[in-house]
Amino acid sequence: MTEPSGETAPEAPEDVEPAEEVREGAGAATGEPDAAGEPDAAGDAGEAAEKTAEDAEESAEGAEKTAEDAEESAEGAEKPAGDAGDSDASGLSEAQAELAAQRELRAKIEARKAEKGGPVAAGAKLSGTAADLLAAVRAVEGGAAEGGSFYEAAEPAPRPSVPEPAPAAAPRPPAPERATAPAPAATAAVREVLARGGAPEALAGPVAAALGEGAAAVLLDDPWQLLAVAGVRPEQADGFARALLGPDCGPGDPRRTTALTVWLLERASFQGHTAQEVGTVRAGLAAHSVPDPEEAVDTAVSEGAVHLFQEEREAPEETEEESEESEDSGGGADESGESGGEPPALLGLDRYALAEESLAEGLARLVRTATADAWEGSELERAAGAHGLVLHTGGEAARAEPVALAAAARERGLRALVAVHSDGGRRALGAEGTEAVTVAALLSGTAGPDRDEDGAFALDLLVVLDAPQLDVETAATLVESLPDGCRLVLSGDPEVLGAPGAGRVFADALAARVCPRIASRVPDPGPLGELVSGIGVGELNQVEAPGKEVVIVPVRDAGEAVHRTVQLVADSVPRAIGVPPERTQVVTVGHGGSAGTRALNAALKQRLNPGPGRFGGYDPGDRVAYAPVPGRTVTGTVLSADAGGLRLRCGDDEVLVPKERVESALRHGWALTAHQAAGTRWPAVVAVLPGDAAGGLSRAWVYTAFGRAERHLSVVHGVDQALPRAVAEGVAPERTTRLRPLLEALLAAPGE
């Protein structure tokens, strides 16, 4: 049996075998830390930490982050191994620029928290000090103030002496920023504290990177801050705390309960949630033996570690018919509280609160500052001319409509740009894709238009394809970068799996009903289009496939699934369909198990490119999946290796993966998960559904996986009736977010 590891299955942390007990494993933990800073402890500890990361990655509606270790490696993986300097870096790559942008966002949050001087009131919006802080950030980024003064001064930096237009993110600096690698002395001090607490010394680097220069003192005062390091479990932090504090610590220690509250919300973000209901967090605390979960939540809120939000819900206006039906049924509110009741209170982390509030305000700014104009043309063109924000939905064939909109806008003399999720999505646009850019390249400054003195892009219209792949932090940064009066069109297929990061930006914007929503009427063509369209409405139809566009390959077990997959990729598809192995993509439910990506990639490498893996497990010619930053996967091929790391060919670009990041940021890529594959299509796709993958299937997963195929789809089918049942009933759990009520409060119009 393979281990269930579905991307869309609800997470069950208790089912994950915990890594070694930190307190008891000091003498046995001799492994070296990986590039993300997670320990590779003796026995199965490293594997357990990896499994924990992947369980989080593969959970509800797939909060795919390539691996949980990649989330924390946004800081830790940037530092050279052995605390080496950055002298070898003569400039920033796209990935480094993206990571710099993430560090900058974290710096905003830390500075904001430092300015508060006390807890944030429940449901507070960006105003007062927080608003001044954002203005200060923009002043520093825009060049009106020195960066050092911003981080060192107690007061926010002054606003730039420019007109007040719209909030806008500044250009990402092309020079290296503050060093994220901890000083050797700080690491040594942390190592001593870890040794006293019986923790593996290999954690010293990650702890120092996560907690800063004063990490040793922080751990001595609050040992549960060890949970800030990726892969560390509450049981491990408890053992470490007992070793340091002795009988002075207990399950109700406020330090423990606060750290656990933050940890639970971080774990939820891996599933795509930006917030959690208070009751859910209390239940999680109770599961970890917290004696008074209600008091624990109150303590975490009062200390400013988390924030409490009570969003106001606008009562919908009843039509005359609805009013009569209410009277006939006896009137009154639904006892369940689902109709007319107050929404539940939510708990959230500062980073996601800032991102969602900033995004909502930025979208409202675009709506309010756009000048209505009468554009002739399609329904989408007319809507874009009259509104600052437009949402466009449709399948793969419908992508041509927003691209045509951008072309028409250029003919009108407007500065228009199309942004996509991946290079594959850009290449799929054909000739029209030559002027398109990826969102990552646009934000990192490696592609797209210049920015003005306020940090805003020189654009009149931005069209974003693959909008469901936008997480809330990326979307907030993107919208902040648009000037007043710029039109924004978000286009995508709402049936595909959601963003790999936290948030559900496109779905929330659609649900808020605060702007025009244009549904494409262009169907996806051919048998594949018919099959995928049916899945989208909950029907798994048999389709006529005279050209072998769809082939079902039944299997009995995971071993046979792997064997038949290799046979299809290496022989059957090239011979019968004419698509070579390098243009065929395998998609499976998760990383783990006997038919997950690891097992499939091992078998495919053995058949297609055997070798000793002399370069960190890779050989020239290996197909790989590279995560330059958490949440974004780029596929490529290994070219060579040298002292600097592995050199890859990713599309038209040559990419260097530093050797210290190879372990955390690179996987073999013949087989991907559906979340890694989202936003890209291939001529042929082999979807692998082993028998025990049934728990990880949902309609969105099947829709996304099957929809990656352009010409041919082979389904290695071992789940029997679980597949049609997943298509008919398998709705992925919704993510808990705050963007929809924020948009409704800012932009709701009468009658909406």
Image (cartoon, rainbow, N blue to C red):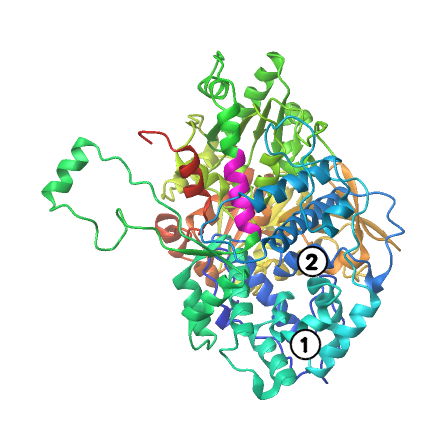
Residue 347's disc is none
Name which residue type carries label 2.
Ser
Q: Position of residue 179 (x, y in %)?
A: 80, 54
- In the rendered image, residue 413 lying in the magenta stretch gets the answer no
Q: Nearer the viewer, residue 344 or 25?
A: 344
Q: Main secondary structure of the magenta part?
A: helix
- Spot occupied by residue 16 in the image (x, y as percentages of width and height): 53, 71
Q: Amino acid at mark 1?
A: Leu
Q: Tell me which label, 1 or 2, sits earlier in the chain.
A: 2
Residue 448 placement: quadrant: top right
Residue range corresponding to the magenta coloring: 351-362
Q: Is residue 517 visible?
A: yes
Q: Quadrant of residue 599?
A: bottom right
| Mark identifier at residue 73 | 2
The crowd level at tag 2 (other Cα within 10 Å; few <14, some 14-19, many 20+) is many
Q: CA distance from mark 1 to mark 2?
A: 24 Å
Q: Percent x, y for residue 259?
A: 56, 68
Q: Secondary structure at mark 2?
A: helix
Determine crowd level at label 1: few under 14, some 14-19, many 20+ residues with C-alpha closer than 10 A: some
Q: Which residue is mark 1?
A: 220
Q: Nearer the viewer, residue 510 or 480?
A: 480
Q: Is residue 610 visible?
A: no
Residue at x-position 59% and y-position 39% = 681
Q: Give SS at disc 1.
A: helix
Horizontal side of 484 relative to 360 (left or right) equals right
Give the residue drawn at x 89%, y 51%: 88
Furthest residue in direction bottom, as rendered: 247
Give the answer, above or below, for where 670 lies relative to 743. below
